[in-house]
Image: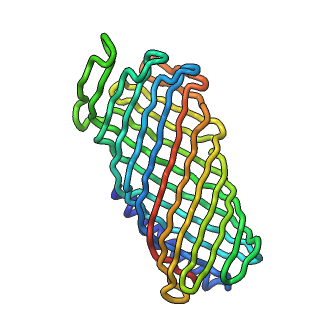
Amino acid sequence: MTATRHAFLPLTAGLLAFSCGMALANDERVGASIGVGLANIRAHETVFSGDHKLSQLEWQSKAVQVLRGSLDIDVGSGWSVKLEGKTGINGNGHMVDYDWLVPGADWTHRSEHDDTGLDHYYNGSVEVNRLLFGDSLQNLSVGIGGRYTDVKWTARGGDFVYSVDSFRDTIGSFTSGVAGISYQQKIPVLYATLNGEQTMGRFRLTGALEVGAVIRNRSGDDHWLRNLRVDDSFKLSPMFGAKAGIEYSLTQNIALYLDGSFEATKFRRGDAEYADTTGNTYYEDGAGGGFAAGYIGTGVRGSF
């Protein structure tokens, strides 16, 4: 993921340069920030046959190093626009794959993959807010926004327990370092948000709540050892999020900040298409999934 890091730094520098240019071009207030942080990311994918859950794969990465940049523009008359981007620059992971081949029984197959890599994590959003009321010390605003998340893992090697001739009778390992399964989620979200700020001396507290929906999200699953590709498409699903932060002003225009965010969604049942060397098979309501991410970071913010 080192290429991502090199691509993100000029992007953030561009945001800062753009914000300075905006400040010189007019009298409206512009803020730009850059920071680093850590994220915990979780996702799961589920395979159904009717009401019976056949399989579930649980993916997670902890303490992923993340670069973050944001741009806030006060366009006047109580309106503001905010852009934010995050990208993971380093992160490992873990995956567990469960199968339930006997309805009503506990899992019959399980594989565990400690050698799971986070191939990429991108998160970007744009938000438009309208001030409800406030002054120089406190304010409350409402807004609408859109966010897009793209995350992908690859699991290699691993150990398994299978039920071949009897229940959980076979134990073994996959070849170390060989890719077994890759999984990618692409998640577009539309949401409404309520934002609040409170200034106390040099400190500024911020918070936000988000409620929205995942729109036409998709996921892809490659089983490399089986030459199998699964593409899932999902129906409208709810999303919830929250943000909180604290800033300390060093000067009138420069502040240090510590902030955090969380978002989660459980996908409604969707359709799955299986493709291999023998052709394609389509399963209506055969796919499920979910996503959650928490982030905490620190950085510097400038206003102009």
Q: Position of residue 146 (x, y in %)?
A: 63, 55
Q: Position of residue 151 (x, y in %)?
A: 46, 47
Considering only vertical position in the picture, is 190 above or below 131?
Answer: above
Looking at the image, which residue sits at the far top?
165
Q: Residue at the location (51% across, 84% down)?
A: 249
Considering only vertical position in the picture, is 274 above or below 118?
Answer: above
Indicate the quadrant where residue 27 lies. bottom right
Looking at the image, which residue sits at the far bottom?
251
In this view, the residue in front, 202 or 1, is 202
Left or right relative to 100: residue 135: right
Q: How many marks?
A: 0
Q: Residue at the location (51% across, 32% down)?
A: 231
Q: Residue at the location (51% across, 24% down)?
A: 53
Left or right relative to 36: residue 70: right
| Quarter in which the C terminus is drawn | bottom right
Left or right relative to 111: residue 46: right
Q: Position of residue 278 (x, y in %)?
A: 44, 17
Question: Which color scheme is applied?
Answer: rainbow
| Quarter in which the N terminus is drawn | bottom left
Indicate the quadrant where residue 174 lies. top left
Q: Position of residue 171 (x, y in %)?
A: 25, 23
Considering only vertical position in the picture, is 253 above or below 165?
Answer: below
Q: Residue at the location (47% across, 78% down)?
A: 256
